[in-house]
Amino acid sequence: MINKNRMFDAVMALSPKVRATLVEQLVKTPLEITTPRGPLKMVGHGHRSYRRAKTLLTKEPHTLEWIDAMPAGCRFWDIGANIGTMSLYAAQRGDLSISAFEPSAVNFHLLTANMQLNNVSALCFPFGFSDRNIIDTLECDAFGAGGAFTYTSKRGGLPSRQTAVTWRIDDFVTTYEVAPPHYIKLDVHGLTTAIIIGAKATLRSVTELQTETTESGGGAAIITILEDAGFKIARKFKRNHTTGGDILFSRQ
């Protein structure tokens, strides 16, 4: 068994230049995940991003099945893409138009790096969505790639604060004449309701939307808003490796 402390001490005993070269080489050596469509390469910058990569096929199997069933040529938006696991899986198909949105600088770096590693096509946007067009403050960990960060304060806070642009989806679509999505995966803690409120016009073009929520508490408000927009609950899922769950909404 490897003694991690001794290994760390040995690395730190190297000169700064050698350590920098070693880190660079380790960063450029990706993990490889075997999927039904072939291997996916993913950068592992710490235990969080490593865990996200390793659980790609087991954490949300229902999401993978959903992506597999999307019609060729449709537009898929991954809102709260993190390091891009689901966007990468969707991009492997080669017949979807994919947009991935991630405001955290540390996660966005890995999102784009993972796209580059796999030579797949997706539009990656370094901002988030809400019910207002504002410059907001994101609590994050600059060394915690793969973490789920938030615009709302956590107990004790996080060690870093980052400025982040947020858009109303409706205004983003009209301002830049963006084709609206057919399918949306929405995974943004604390902002789901606000994002949906800011997307009322765009939702008319959406066939299905999946979001991490429940049927109680704040989730009840989300369900009401989406039902008023013409959606109904199609399926409910429990996530593996976590206590959370997802609800899939389909247009009636």
Image (tube, helix red, strand yellow):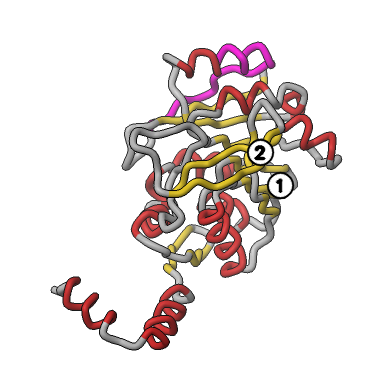
Going by the numbered disc 2, the residue's amino acid type is Ile
Residue drawn at point x = 55 percent, y = 27 percent: 192
Label 1 residue SS: loop
Q: Position of residue 188 (x, y in %)?
A: 52, 35
Q: Residues within 10 Å of mark 2 (few under 14, many from 20)?
A: few
Q: Relative to 7, say whether 191 is above or below.
A: above
Going by the numbered disc 1, the residue's amino acid type is Ala
Residue drawn at point x = 58 percent, y = 12 percent: 224
Magenta span:
223-238
| Residue 92 position by quadrant | bottom right
Q: Nearer the viewer, residue 130 or 196?
A: 130
C-alpha distance separating marks 2 and 1: 36 Å
Q: Position of residue 54 (x, y in %)?
A: 37, 57
Q: Position of residue 149 (x, y in %)?
A: 46, 42
| Residue 210 position by quadrant | top right
Of the numbered discs in the image, which one, if any, rests on residue 187?
none
Q: Position of residue 33 (x, y in %)?
A: 43, 63
Of the numbered discs in the image, which one, if any, rests on residue 72?
1
| Residue 193 position by quadrant | top right
Q: Quadrant of the N terminus?
A: bottom left
Of the numbered discs in the image, which one, if any, rests on residue 135?
2
Q: Nearer the viewer, residue 131 or 178?
A: 131
Q: In this rendering, would 125 be left or right of 57?
A: right
The tag earlier along the polypeptide, 2 or 1, is 1
Q: Relative to 202, say whether 122 is above or below.
A: below
